[in-house]
Amino acid sequence: MSAVIVVGGGLAGLLTAYRLTQAGHSVVVREAAPRWGGMIAPVEVAGMLVDSGAEAYATRGGHGRALCDELGLEVAAPEGTPHVWWSKRAWPMADGLLGIPGDLDDPALGVLTDAERTRFAADLTMDPAIGREALTIGDLARIRLGEGALQKLVEPVATGIYATGAEHLPLAAVAPGIHEAIQAEGSLIAAVASQKAHRGSAVEQPVGGMFRLIETLVDRVEDLGADIRAAAPITHLRRSGHGLAAHTHDGENLVAERIVLATTAAVSEHLLRDLGVVFVAPPVNKARQAILALDNTALREHPVGSGVLVASRGEVRAKALTHYSAKWPWARESGLEVVRVSYPEHVFPTRQEILADASRLTGVAVTDSQVKGLSSVGWDAMPTRIEAANRDYLVEAAAGVGVDLVGAWLDGNGVASVIAGTRRVVS
């Protein structure tokens, strides 16, 4: 078996290293950051560890559950109904598909005007063939349900879950088989109802936090004999008489037959230039959030269920609020209420602005004296979706110089997408 260097210690890098060591390869893992996990790293607040980035995986496809089962991790579905903020109040999110209700009695439809609700209901009598040409969930929702339903029901969910606008989310990725279901059931609403009847929770996480997956992978990779080290950024690559060489910031020289880049697009672009592969890294998104641990008895009633996605900001600067301890029961053991308030890249909220947003979105007064812990987390390289053809071209170009590429910037945001993408390396 060959020697492999894996650059990057997020989910993509650690899972690839785990699979390669299982297959008998000699594996070295180097991570630039001082901790493992990338966007699945925890943060400490009021003495407890809480997910600072991704907090769950999509159950569709079964990739996340299968990996957790393999690693012996107990999993749990979230509790509480999520909400959407529109016109100065929170409305329950539709119990359906990406914000689309499966019936006309869903409380989520209260956010629509009478005209928008009439337009939404027109889907039930519309020719099932209408919208067949739609390629994204946004296009399909606009055609069959109307602009109001798209903006108030679907768009907040798309951007909140996938960090991507609904008109950029391919149906093949987020709602495979929906066109066939519309034909069979007669409408999009009926198709959603049919699929909902056969679907459990859309997401789940390992009990204790999504970061438990990372901790377990690190332990397994070490147990299998891989050489892994964090706080050791790879500065450049070069060809060697024995294959490929990678050099760390602190002077370590590593040589292997293969290299796996499980890094951000910008880092992959930089390192591949050393080997003659030149491309322009796709744009990234930025975001930040504040994580609060609160001693607030009113929040124990879970007034907005698992949280709120903000569809119309107005006086609210945040783009979402997750009532983490309501959503994930294990987090209630501390006796404090844990809330994550997320902000767009151009907003740098003060402490008082964070408390004001938390108060507005939950409908509960949150005061400074109730704050028992507050941590601020920023993400500067959240990947955007790239076209499949572009991904395949980059993967092939890198393979030509002995390098494999994995990660969310290639395969899309979401734990399931990243897991599936690692199969290119270990299949």
Image: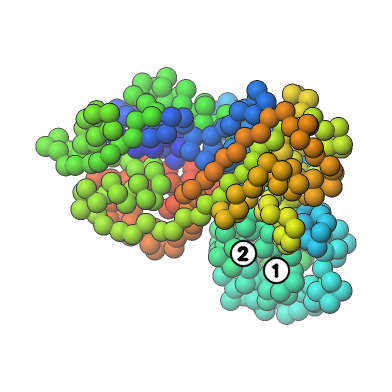
- Left or right: where does residue 241 sit relative to residue 214? left
Element class at badge 1: helix
Q: Is residue 20 above or below residue 394?
A: above
Please tell me which of labels 2 and 1 falls first in the chain: 1
Q: Is residue 278 visible?
A: yes
Give 201 or 30, whichever is nearer the viewer: 30
Residue located at (52% from left, 52% from top): 286
**Label 2 close to label 1 by CB (< 8 Å):** yes
Q: Is residue 367 above or below residue 194?
A: above
Which label belongs to residue 166? 2
Which label belongs to residue 150? 1
Q: Position of residue 149 (x, y in %)?
A: 74, 69
| Dot 1 alpha-carbon crowd within 10 angstroms: few under 14, some 14 to 19, many 20 or more | many
Q: CA distance from mark 2 to mark 1?
A: 8 Å
Give 205 or 296, whichever is nearer the viewer: 296
* Amino acid bearing label 1: Leu
Residue located at (49% from left, 34% from top): 37
- Left or right: where does residue 343 sit relative to residue 411? right
Q: Position of residue 375 (x, y in %)?
A: 62, 35
Element class at badge 2: helix
* Amino acid bearing label 2: Ala
Indicate the quadrant containing the N terminus: top left, top right, bottom left or bottom right: top left
